[in-house]
Image (cartoon, rainbow, N blue to C red):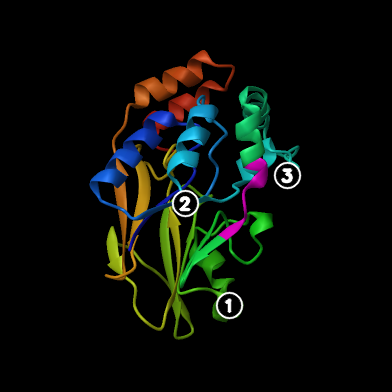
Amino acid sequence: MRIAVISDIHSNIEALTEVLRVCDQQKVDRIVSLGDIVGYGASPNPCCELVRSVAEVTLLGNHDAAVAGRMDYSYYYDAARHALDWSANVLTDENMAWLRSLPYTYRIGEVGFCHGSPIDPKAYEYIFALEQARELTPYVEELPEVTFIGHSHLCRAFAIGNGEVNDVVAQKFGIRRGYKYIISVGSVGQPRDYDNRACFVICDTDARTVEYLRVEYDIETAAQKIFDADLALNFGKRLFLGV
């Protein structure tokens, strides 16, 4: 089974459309969304509607939770908070109700999915460095063999086993038996690893492989929509830089 794992779309319909086109080309069997459909970008409704139509399940990201009234976001910085307020005002009732219904976690056999750290999904803790991955060691027996996460917008993978936690640095790699993996899938709509192409992952459960895929999309149009909306200009500018 080939599972496409997408995350952190952030209202970027141009990026999402191209990623789904590649998913079709790659003949994936399932699409799982790790959340953060909204926030930052200018196309929350089209993104919600498209994800709803293609994803087997969508998890609740922190931006989704904020917009849907399921978490306090008063501590967010002004521009991000304003983008969430803007999104809440333009979302249709149907899309808002959908966001309010989303789960925190999902599992397909020995493959788990979560937006942030799987230890306390509602806390939305980050895992993008070895130090953070090492904090999962006491809980390793509770984890599925592979856990996919989003949230950081970074492409990072960690293997936990034999009392060690190691980086996995490869565009495509195999899942070794006896290890547990935490895999951060990057961002569809707002990459932050200095590569401005949309990013997602395909997990092949039969071949036991994980592959990162990068997809070019119409950044100019996505950014211009942000410039034209009542949103911080930086949210559009950073799309060109991938940060």
**Secondary element type, mark 3:** loop
**Neighbourhood count class around disc 1 (C-alpha, 10 Å): few under 14, some 14–19, many 20 upward:** few
Task: Give the quarter of the figure containing the N terminus.
Answer: bottom left
Q: Amino acid at mark 3?
A: Arg
Q: CA distance from mark 2 to mark 3?
A: 22 Å
Q: Quadrant of residue 105?
A: bottom right
Reading the chain from its start, which is encountered first: label 3 or label 1? 3
**Residue 184 against residue 46 in the figure, above or below:** below
Left or right: residue 14 versus residue 40 is left
Q: Amino acid at mark 1?
A: Glu
Residue 229 image point, x, y percent: 54, 16
In the picture of the structure, the residue carrying the numbered disc 3 is: 70
Residue 101 image point, x, y percent: 65, 46
Residue at the image point whose x is 45% and y is 31% from the top = 12
Q: How many marks?
A: 3
Q: CA distance from mark 1 to mark 2?
A: 24 Å
In the picture of the structure, the residue carrying the numbered disc 2 is: 56
Closer mark to the observer between disc 2 and disc 3: 2
Residue at the image point whose x is 63% and y is 41% from the top = 99
Reading the chain from its start, which is encountered first: label 1 or label 2? 2
Q: What residue range appears in magenta? A: 99-105
**Secondary element type, mark 2:** loop
Foreground residue among 227 and 98:
98
